[in-house]
Image (cartoon, grey):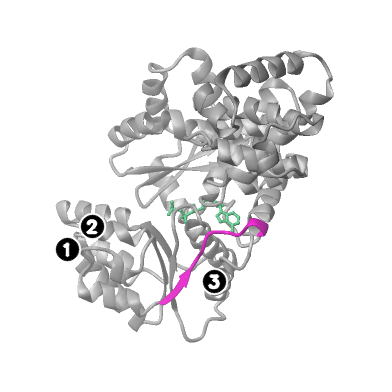
């Protein structure tokens, strides 16, 4: 086992309980270091999420001390049988001390194996970006050697960049593919300036590079020296017919404090925007992710998530991971109720539902008009709709009894009477009213809660 990793583990062990250490840390395997990035092998997605959320900062702090070249962490899923095989191979050949240096030499850039073209769901929102990236990676692209993927957070820029890297290396393992974020590029440059190795840095990104994948260009805002180094790098790569893929969350001209020279180089690149996915694409993404994770999701849960989360696809993934975790821990299948609980907890704000929303859904569900709902008509169906409307207003909003009463043209005591009565009814087992309230709650959440 690698010496430095043992030291890192020892230090982190002191900060955790035994159970946490055994479960989450002892099962991590260091895989490689590339471009200042220490790649850690984890057992599954849930393992990665946990380490990322609870341990990353501490782990990085300690890793940086043990391995000064490390500046960030990345994760890969490593199947247990793969690790077992490696262990058996090692045992066969006798114990071997592998240094991190060897690991660095052995490995290419650490591309996420999950981020492939196969796993990327294509819709109207991202079709152009997908096609252009694919064309670049399969060398079909004749006129544009360079691409700029432009999108808000969590819409697939890194996924496509890694997919390009994965495909290049799969087809041509000897290709020199450099993958860095603009921040890493800047850090490496500063590091090499400090340590007198700027020529090596320049060589790495200019002469020693066939494909440059540069993420999050917006980071360079205001960093004049790094910007001008990048301009030289891009010029040289483009002059030599090399390929460049950049990503950013804004058009180059809209990134503040970006030099005219860099803006001009980047603007000359083919712009491929990715829009927010539409409902159908979101449905497909959820189905694909569930399939990859080997999880069975009822269609109503798929639709609920697709309604609920309209932007950042990471949120969809977090909710899936959360649902899987909860379903595993409790030993229950993923259901609508579980999905509602998890999304409410995981998305950092509670849904904003108003009394008006509730009234509209009630009218649509009972097929009555708003006038009827707010009227004094005592017809059974209408009275029941009104009662459920008041009850849900109490559950989903923070409005006072008086305010709710006003919205239904009733006194606060009528609201209280309705809410208490319905609460009691709902507690009884298997009653129709309970099912009806659940149904309307679901409709309410799926129709109003688009983030
Ligand atoms: N079209 C898609 N199909 C399948 N998964 C997707 C798609 N778009 C995004 N994802 C998934 O969403 C997650 C976030 O995507 P990614 O990391 O590529 O976002 P990003 O645009 O680079 O965000 P940021 O700017 O915050 O880094 C990833 O797990 C990725 O696999």
Q: Earlier in the sequence, mark 2 or mark 3?
A: 3
Q: Which residue is mark 1?
A: 225
Question: At 66% across and 34% down in the image, what residue appears?
Answer: 339
Left or right of residue 402, residue 221 in this image:
left
Residues at marks 2 and 1 touching, judged by CB atoms closer than 8 Å? yes
Q: Secondary structure at mark 2?
A: helix
Q: Label 2 to label 3, Cα distance in Å?
A: 27 Å
Residue range highlighted in magenta:
270-280
Residue 451 image point, x, y percent? 52, 46
| Viewer-nearest residue: 54 or 35 | 54
Q: Which residue is mark 3?
A: 137
Q: Label 2 to label 1, Cα distance in Å?
A: 10 Å
Q: Label 3 to label 1, Cα distance in Å?
A: 30 Å
Residue 276 part of the magenta segment: yes
Outermost front residue: 376
Q: Earlier in the sequence, mark 2 or mark 1?
A: 2
- In this view of the protein, can residue 28 be seen by the observer? no
| Viewer-nearest residue: 1 or 50 | 50
- The dot on residue 63 is none
Q: Earlier in the sequence, mark 3 or mark 1?
A: 3
Question: At 58% across and 74% down in the image, what residue appears?
Answer: 138
Residue 321 image point, x, y percent? 61, 36
Q: Residues within 10 Å of mark 1 (few under 14, many from 20)?
A: few
Q: Which residue is mark 2?
A: 189
């Amino acid at each position: 086992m690698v010496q430095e990793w043992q030291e890192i583990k020892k230090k982190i062990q002191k900060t955790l309980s035994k159970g946490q250490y055994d479960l989450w840390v002892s099962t991590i395997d260091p895989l490689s270091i590339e471009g200042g990035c220490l790649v850690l092998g984890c057992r599954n997605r849930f393992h990665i999420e946990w380490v990322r959320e609870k341990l990353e900062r501490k782990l990085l702090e300690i890793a940086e001390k043990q391995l000064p070249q490390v500046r960030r962490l990345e994760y890969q899923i490593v199947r247990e049988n793969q690790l077992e095989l490696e262990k058996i191979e090692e045992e066969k050949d006798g114990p071997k001390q592998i240094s991190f240096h060897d690991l660095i030499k052995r490995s290419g850039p650490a591309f996420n194996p999950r981020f492939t073209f196969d796993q990327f769901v294509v819709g109207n929102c991202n079709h152009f970006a997908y096609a252009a990236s694919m064309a670049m990676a399969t060398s079909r692209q004749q006129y544009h050697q360079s691409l700029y993927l432009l999108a808000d957070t969590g819409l697939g820029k890194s996924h496509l960049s890694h997919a390009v890297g994965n495909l290049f290396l799969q087809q041509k393992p000897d290709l020199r593919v450099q993958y860095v974020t603009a921040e890493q590029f800047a850090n490496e440059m500063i590091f090499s300036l400090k340590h007198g190795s700027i020529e090596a840095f320049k060589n790495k990104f200019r002469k020693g590079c066939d494909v440059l994948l540069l993420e999050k260009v917006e980071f360079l805002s205001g960093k004049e020296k790094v910007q001008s180094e990048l301009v030289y790098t891009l010029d040289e790569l483009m002059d030599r017919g090399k390929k460049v893929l950049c990503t950013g969350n804004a058009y180059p001209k809209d990134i503040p404090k970006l030099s005219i020279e860099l803006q001009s180089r980047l603007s000359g690149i083919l712009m491929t925007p990715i829009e927010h996915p539409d409902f159908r694409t979101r449905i497909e993404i959820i189905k694909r992710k569930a399939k990859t994770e080997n999880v069975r999701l009822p269609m109503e849960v798929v639709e609920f998530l697709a309604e609920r989360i309209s932007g950042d696809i990471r949120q969809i993934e977090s909710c899936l991971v959360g649902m899987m975790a909860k379903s595993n821990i409790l030993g229950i299948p993923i259901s609508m109720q579980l999905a509602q609980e998890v999304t409410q907890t995981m998305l950092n704000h509670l849904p904003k539902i108003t009394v008006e929303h509730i009234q509209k859904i009630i009218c649509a569900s009972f097929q009555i008009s708003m006038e009827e709902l707010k009227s004094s008509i005592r017809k059974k169906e209408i009275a029941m709709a009104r009662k459920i409307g008041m009850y849900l207003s109490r559950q989903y909003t923070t409005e006072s009894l008086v305010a709710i009463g006003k919205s239904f043209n009733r006194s606060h005591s009528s609201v209280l009477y309705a809410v208490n009565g319905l609460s009691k009814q709902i507690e009884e087992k298997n009653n129709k009213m309970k099912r009806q309230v659940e149904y309307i709650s679901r409709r309410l959440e799926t129709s109003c809660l688009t983030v």
